[in-house]
Amino acid sequence: MTTFLAGGTGTPKLLAGASEVFPPTGTTVVGNTGDDVELGGHLVSPDLDTILFMDGGVLDRETWWGIADDGGTTHEELRRLAEEVGLGVGPRYLPEDAQTAGRDIARWRRFSGVGEFMYIGDRDRAVHITRTSLVDEGHTLTEATRTLADAFGLDRDLLPMSDDPVATIVHTPEGPMHFQEWWVARGGEPAVEDVEFRGADDATPTEAVLASLADPVVVGPSNPVTSIGPMTAMDEFRAALDDTAVVAVSPFVGDRVFSGPAAKLMEATGHEASTAGVAEAYPFADAFVLDEDDPTDLDRPIVRTDTALDNGEDSERVARAVAGALEVVAR
Ligand code: GDP
């Protein structure tokens, strides 16, 4: 068995065409939940859903989130209603005291559905309603995710990193805001002063996650701050990574990032925005897969390949490099 740590883009892209090398039945994916929100009373887990939809064969591969060809009738009507009465379509937090009331898993990230600031497709919404209702029926997020995985016919284990709330909060000169406000509503502005994983001190990885971390672990080319950071902010998670074989794929080529806000967030959290900075942020990684054009040298074993992940052939090539690095580490 091999365990992959995943955000919503890099690791899914790696897994998308990797089944020859890492058959789904032999892989576990541990998904980040720091990006999750409660929106209009529904729990949205973007990173878990990308894997759910990818393995279920319905993922929108243009965006790497949401269901392909989904309708947006409810979303559009929510925005129309809000705009009709001048309420706008920006993020609207529930009041301060509501942030820690209600469902425990939704702490510090509870948004009103008025004007719905994140796009939720119609079929996508059915997933969020099912997840939320299962949690309200008394199931853990892990159990709700397993049920959804069964509904989408997944062959691999898909695990949320924790059943406890951990919320990624970006601190800016304009004050703190949830990652989804900063990224989705504000397009990655304003400047970031620090990133906080609220709740992480009291959160633990689940038993299922800890068991999966006893297998060799692959940190896909993820955002080290907002996708892997919420996981490693939990002491037990970090300790488990220290005790197991870990291979990491860089989301950078030298100091060039493939996509997303990783560079800005790395700098805001005191790391160089580069492969060297990723290596520093991952002291638990025993080997790295780097791009053949990446000039970085590291104090740990490196396997090189073209790390661009644009199609199934790319995924398979990078997956073979990962398997090679795992062999080096196992020796
Ligand atoms: P998020 O949840 O959408 O923020 O995504 P992840 O954390 O899963 O992945 C974001 C990271 O994936 C970014 O830092 C990108 O640099 C990286 N990434 C995206 N496409 C590629 C690619 O084709 N190759 C590699 N190596 N990394 C990529």
Image (cartoon, rainbow, N blue to C red):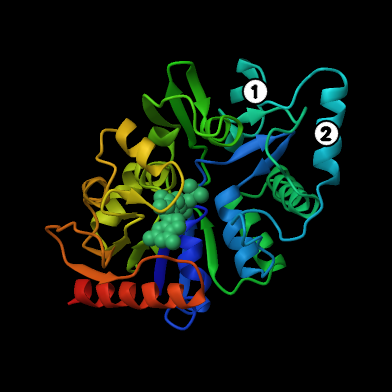
Considering every residue shown, the one lying at the far bottom of the view is 20
For the residue labelled by badge 2, is the local secondary structure a helix, a strand or a loop? Answer: helix
What residue is rendered at 78% in x and 52% in y?
A: 126
Residue to which mark 2 is pinned: 78
Foreground pick, 118 / 240 = 118
Where residue 31 appears, as percent x and y from the top left, is 50, 54
Q: Is residue 1 left or right of residue 100?
A: left
The amino acid type, in three-letter code, at marker 2 is Leu
> Is residue 207 visible in this depiction of the protein?
no
Is the distance from the Cβ of mark 2 to the nearest ligand 1 atom less than 8 Å?
no
Picture quarter containing residue 251? bottom left
Above or below, 147 relative to 85: below
> Is residue 69 visible in this depiction of the protein?
yes
Q: Quadrant of the C terminus?
A: bottom left
Residue to which mark 1 is pinned: 93
The amino acid type, in three-letter code, at marker 1 is Tyr
**Distance of label 1 from label 2 (alpha carbons):** 16 Å
Tell me if mark 2 has few (under 14), some (14-19) or many (20+) residues whose alpha carbon lies within 10 angstroms of its own. some
Of the two numbered discs 1 and 2 on the same chain, state the one appearing first in sequence: 2
Foreground pick, 15 / 207 = 15
What residue is rendered at 36% in x and 47% in y?
A: 224
Above or below, 12 relative to 126: below
What residue is rendered at 26% in x and 68% in y?
A: 292
| Total numbered labels placed on residues in the image | 2
Disc number at residue 146? Answer: none
Q: Quadrant of the N terminus?
A: bottom left
Location of ligand 1 given as a quarter of the image: bottom left
Tell me if mark 1 has few (under 14), some (14-19) or many (20+) residues whose alpha carbon lies within 10 angstroms of its own. some
Q: Is residue 20 left or right of residue 300?
A: right
Picture quarter containing residue 287? bottom left
